[in-house]
Amino acid sequence: MASRVFMVRPAAFGPNPQTAQSNAFQSEEKPPDNLPELARLEFDALVHSLRNAGVLVEVFDEPSETANPDAVFPNNWVSFHPKKGRVFLYPMLAPTRRDERRPQWVDQLVIDWPQTKITDLSPHEKDGRFLEGTGSLIFDPLQELIFATRSPRTDDELVHQVATDLGLRAMLFDAFDKNGQAIYHTNVVFGLGQHLAMGCWEAIPQDQRIEVITTLNSSNRPVMHLNHEQMASFAGNWIELEGHSGPVMALSKTAWQSLQPSQKAVIQDIYEVVVGTIPLIETFGGGSVRCMICSVDAR
């Protein structure tokens, strides 16, 4: 479990028309005029809650001159693999998002690693091939395995390339919302930690669902089911971290309120729960707490 993460404090958060076509979670309603300021308040409160739980949060401020509407979601452009000494930079579908990549931040974060190999996959953008970090890829901490849902933002060949580079297997499958639209990122469908798998398995076609759940069950951790309404409330978009007192689950207030009392009881038996109140970031960014947090390493 990661106890050190990094997050990006946004300068110009707002709706991104270039991502809306493939992200049904984004709202088309008119945002408040002071949305960037309000989003920073939501961001700061989440950082404060994570730190109170004992998570080491490295915060980078997005430069004000860049004006990237989705900079608050850094997990889409980088992933860190400390046990392998590897870092990947990823190709992103929306041209407006590509300026978010900041190799100088990566260099700062891995300065104490004994060895580091950084693989830059972003040139694949020229070929129309995309893979959006731990939005596209879920790394199983208990099995040598990557899960990925097919979507315009997740290229099959690139999934297998990352898996091969890390010595892992890859499991690709489809996932759809209630309207039959492909879900844009795997980490909206489900979250996965050492102690729990929780997601909307009914979003996966039945023949593929059986394989996914069988694989998850083989690791002997609880597998909790979410319905489509809970997934739409970002209940699958959670992350397991290490805090002062043990494992932490971080998710949004929207997600937490969508859960049944019995589900909350199971979670609270395992985790200290950090609940972030980020309705504006969710509504106008189409992502939630997991998308905002990029795991780096253990302290």
Image: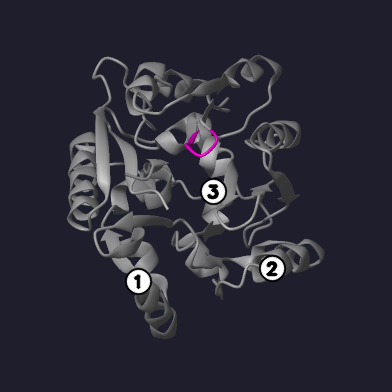
Give the residue at x 59% y 66%: 200
Mark number, residue 24 = 3
Q: Are marks 2 and 1 in contact (CB under 8 Å)?
A: no
Identify the amino acid type marked 2.
Ile
Q: Label 3 amino acid?
A: Ala
Q: Residue at x 40, y 28 (%)?
A: 113
214 shown above or below 175: below
Who comes first in sequence, dot 2 or dot 1? 2
Task: Tell me the element at label 2.
Answer: helix
Report if residue 288 is visible in the image: no
> Residue at label 2?
213
Foreground: disc 1 or disc 3: 1
The dot on residue 247 is none
Place of residue 91 in the rendered image (x, y in percent of width and height, measured from the top left): 58, 25
Mark 3, Cα crowd under 10 Å, few <14 / some 14-19 / many 20+, is some
Depth-wise, is mark 2 or mark 1 nearer the camera? Answer: 2
- Residues drawn in magenta: 80-84
Residue 225 location in percent, x, y?
57, 73
Which is closer to the viewer, label 2 or label 3? 2
Q: Is residue 62 magenta?
A: no
Pointer 1: what residue?
257
Mark 1 nearby-residue class (10 Å; few <14, some 14–19, many ≥20): some
**Horizontal relation, residue 5 to residue 93: left or right:** left
Is residue 257 visible to us here?
yes
Which mark sits nearer the N-terminus, 2 or 3? 3
**Image quarter (top left, top right, bottom left or bottom right) of the C terminus:** top left
Image-based side of 35 in relation to 168, left or right: left
